[in-house]
Amino acid sequence: MNKVIEVLIEALEIENKEVKLTDNFKEYPEWDSLSRLSLIALMDEAFEIQIDDDTFKKIDSVEKLIAEVELRMTK
Amino acid sequence: MATLSFNNIGALGLCAAVPRNKIDNLKHTQNFSSKDVAEVVSKIGVEERRFAPEGMCASDLCYAAAEKLIADLNIDKSEIDLIVFVSQTTDFRMPATSILLQDKLKLGKQTAAFDIGLGCSGFVYGMSIVYSLVNSGGFKNALLLNGETRSRVYSQKDRKTAFLFGDAGTAVMISKHEKFGKSTFDLNSDGSLGDLIKMDHGGYRNPTTPDSLTEKVVDEYGNIRSGEHGYMNGPEVFNFVIREIPRSIKSLMKQTENDESKIDFFIFHQANTFMNNYLAEKMKLPKEKCPSNIRDFGNTSSVSIPLAIATELGDKLNGSKTLFLSGFGVGMSWANAIVSFQDCKISPLVEI
């Protein structure tokens, strides 16, 4: 599984959910402002990156999140 | 790089005061459901806070702490010649609260008094300024007071801040003595991030209007506040902390040729349990070296570092100790220090 998806699953505590690339994870019932904080910590731990709030607000699918992480890791 | 070092300056004693009035966060459900509150409380780790009752100001908490400290240290008030009050919840717009405290504490008119308007970085900044002045030789004993009534700054209908903040005041007596070792301070700021934690109205840029006092729904979560409530962009603050604080801590450790084994305790600004735990984990610091009182007092802004020293290190500061202090927040402003403590007398917590 893609590492970003693993991180997302851990942040949202949705181990039993099937996560599709096209899903807008912000529409999952488990998503809230608290899971956003978990995601920040886990992203930093796993990839040593931070995604600023303005960029993050525009991310509306799992694949866009993966693309953003990859972009930031290559910088 | 704003770095300052001092020898032979230190804290003779420290005292903290809190309001008696306890807020049980899990029962603080007048605006949100018990389930929502329980989720927030579990994340931020704040179970209780103290709220100053109406009419009690930050300066009253500092006054109580200062009187107790002066009595416990048995210092003659005529020997105190500097009083600095760090706060963003002052008594009045003018005059400076420190000057009113000079009179209330019955200190002599030869006392220098001024306020510092910083938040979460304010204890470390305040210490560095007082150390500088005491180091100049012109002062005998200096009172550094940190006081906040943050309970009045934030809306209780905005879940991003409603469960986090509490009220407290502390007093530290700083003096010159050869028993104190070396202390080093590192001061930073980034005003481009000024809107991460902010109160938009009520100052001179955006003066008070009927509209600025009107509570409104401000986001998709239904949070409610007015223009004269503070607000906080939690995720962006967290990003900032992860990015800047470990780097600045490592840099000061390297510059002073320190490593974790030489530091007895790391006292971080008590922001919230989730952030502080992550920070300690990221820095690979042993948990027992990072005491916390977030559970009992929440985030008290610039008071949180000395309050944590008072409540968590009361009996652990005998003899010679080296503390790493790190304050970060509103501004954004952040400051670190490696401070030599020598037989610092910690007074019991005062409740008023």
Image: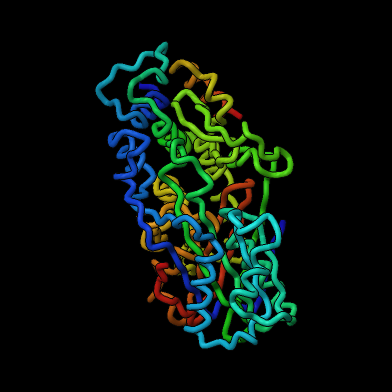
Whether B220 is drawn above or below A35: the answer is above
Residue A1 quadrant: top left
Q: Position of residue B288 (x, y in %)?
A: 36, 62
Q: Residue at x 52, y 54 (%)?
A: B301
Q: Position of residue B171 (x, y in %)?
A: 54, 71
Q: Residue at x 57, y 31 (%)?
A: A52
Of residue B314 and residue B56, the one placed in the foreground of this image is B56
Q: How is the image coloured?
A: rainbow
Q: Position of residue B334 (x, y in %)?
A: 61, 53
Count of residue discs: 0
Q: Is residue B227 visible?
A: yes
Q: Position of residue B100 (x, y in %)?
A: 65, 69
Q: Residue at x 42, y 71 (%)?
A: B350
**Horizontal side of residue A72 vs A38, given as left or right:** right
Whether A70 is drawn above or below B82: the answer is above
Q: Residue at x 37, y 58 (%)?
A: B21
Instruction: Point out the image quarter for the N terminus of chain B.
Output: bottom right
The residue lying furthest to the top in this view is A22
Whether B116 is drawn above or below B233: the answer is below
Residue B98 quadrant: bottom right
